[in-house]
Image (cartoon, rainbow, N blue to C red):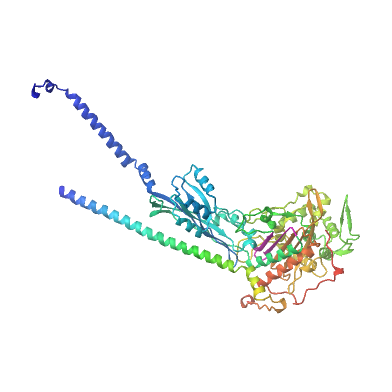
Amino acid sequence: MLRLNLILFAILIICSLGLVSSQHQARKLFNSLEEENDRAKQLEVEHGQLQLEQSTWAMHTRIEKIATQTLRMRAPDARHVQLVPSPQAAK
Amino acid sequence: MKFSTSPVLDLRLPVWRSRLLMLLFLSGFGALGARAAYLQGWNDDFLRAKGESRYSRVLEITANRGRISDRNGEVLAISTPVKSIWATPDEIKFEGDSLAQLANLLEISREDIEKRIQSTEKDFVYLKRQVPPEVADRIAELRIPGLFQSREYRRYYPGGEVMAHVLGFTGADDTGQEGIELAFQEELAGKAGARRVIRDRRGQIVEDMESIKPAQDGHDLMLSMDARIQSQAFTQLSAAMETHHAKAAAVLVLDVTTGEVLAMVNLPSYNPNNRSKLVGAQLRNRALTDTFEPGSTMKPFTIALALEEGRVRPDTVIQTAPGRLTIGKATISDAHPLGALSVAQIIQKSSNVGTSKIAMTLDREDMWDMFNRSGFGIVPSISFPGAVSGKIRPFKTWRPIEQVTMSYGYGLSVSLFQLAQGYTIFARDGELVPISFVRNAGVTAGRKVISAETARAVRAMLEAAAGPGGTAPRAQIMGYRVAGKTGTAHKVEGHGYAGHKYRASFVGFAPVSNPRLVVAVTIDEPSGGKYFGGDVAAPVFSKVMEGALRSLGVAPDAAMKPVEMPPEHERVEESI
């Protein structure tokens, strides 16, 4: 009887330690998951900011201003534009 | 006396007394044990929660609001994170000059900060929201205990004032307040998540415990807008508004085949990124929420009904001389007596008398029905906040003179949006197209209002109106056939019409051989000397339409030669 109790006690201790260590493992893994999620979010944010920057630089009014004032370009006269129908539309 | 003989030693207490005491002690222990077992075994939630509240905290994970882009994927609205600075008044403690530094960084006075911290009973108070990340980092370096930061989002609009009225804007909580941001709040808004963390005494996160609910980012939205056409329209309209010293102006560009809105500009506009000095006039979305008396732009609908019912044919001749028509006490007049005109010429020269004579042959119920089916007097079924119905009174209350004035656009009110949509029936062989602000694929089915023959006949008349012999020769575009109608109306002020305040408009479409776009322009109170729709609004139409057709690569359907302008003395003056 005593031996059985001792064995059961030992198993109990082992199980408890296992629980503790797996809990610890779980938290550690969760932490690294969160870290990666944070990183993904951070990259997403950066992507957004870059898109914002791109949009701001590529504003049509800005492009038009630079084209006409700095580069001295102008839209071609309608007479100098030749429209070529796309082969898909022709079908 | 010896101790052992002390009589006190012989005293005996009764046995029951010690038994009773023992029982009392035992039951005391028993009660304690039971209570402990109850607290820790059966009813352990309360204590567990109390214990956890000492170190664990549920944190909200903010979700990103969806992006808005134009039809080609160009970003129009995007949220990027900023910080909000908040404090727990019980814990906050300033050491040295940290309060002064904080006040400096937040741009709030020291007194204000102190007042905010002391005045609240709550254990949470915002000091400032939407702080740029760089500033927030410097605040974090001050290491003030009890001062925290949380991440929130701020919306940026790279298009600025060009897109302002279409997109609207969001409030401090990143919820839509106007325009598309409000209309599509559900889709755009993300769902915030939550997670449980362990925090130490200073509030720093030591460990993550669990994720209760992951955050869900909002959906991205692709609009029907074309940023290129929109910015061209904005430039042209701004220029026109300046030249004519107008009070306000609006332009709408619709794709006839898909029913998509390609551009919508309202002036005056505002910068949605900096709304500190906003006034009401800038906020108004004139194309959708303002109604006005359309004037002559309504005439094609009257004529279309008369053609549809077989009352007239395009070549039916109607006598408009002497340019005046008296109905009851009222007199309707043309700018100049025009003599005998065909129905087509009535539209081309925009004769009020001619239109009135045709309207008198029509049934008032039919007219009401025609306006109604063309979308006037009803709230347009679009997902945009604030779209108005305009006003057309029930036909039973129409007096004959009212029926006549309505035939040429007085006595009823419409929005520019309704006009533009209404003209799709002429551009699309009789179908009214449902309008969308979101990109949709392919051709959209419309609702039949008039027959294709009638639509084609009116189209031919409108082409003449936008030609050298019409009221709007300035609407012409080199290389494309255009059709459209001018409108010049006195503005209503108080109980009557204002003598020298006008609203000039032009609605038209192109290319006539296979209409692709409808462009509607309205200019409110042009006061630079010119006020006719043909002089003020038609040139804007022409430029916006040309730019849009070219950027969409629509094939020209007319010869590439300079547009024909009538000599100054032969210009047709519009009747108001």
In the picture, measured across the screen, residue B97 lies left or right of residue B40, that is right
Quarter of the image with the N terminus of chain B in it: top left
Residue B473: % across, % down: 79, 68
- Residue drawn at x 71%, y 76% as measured from the top left: A78
Q: Nearer the viewer, residue B509 or B172?
A: B172
Quarter of the image with the C terminus of chain B in it: bottom right
Q: Nearer the viewer, residue B17 or B574?
A: B17
Q: Nearer the viewer, residue B25 or B433?
A: B25
The extreme right residue here reads: B322
The extreme front residue here reads: B96
- Residue drawn at x 21%, y 50% as measured from the top left: A9
Query: Residue B251: within the magenta?
Result: yes
Query: Residue A78: within the magenta?
Result: no
Residue B197: % across, % down: 40, 52
In the picture, measured across the screen, residue A61 lies left or right of residue B12, that is right
Is residue B299 among the parts visible in the rendering? Answer: no
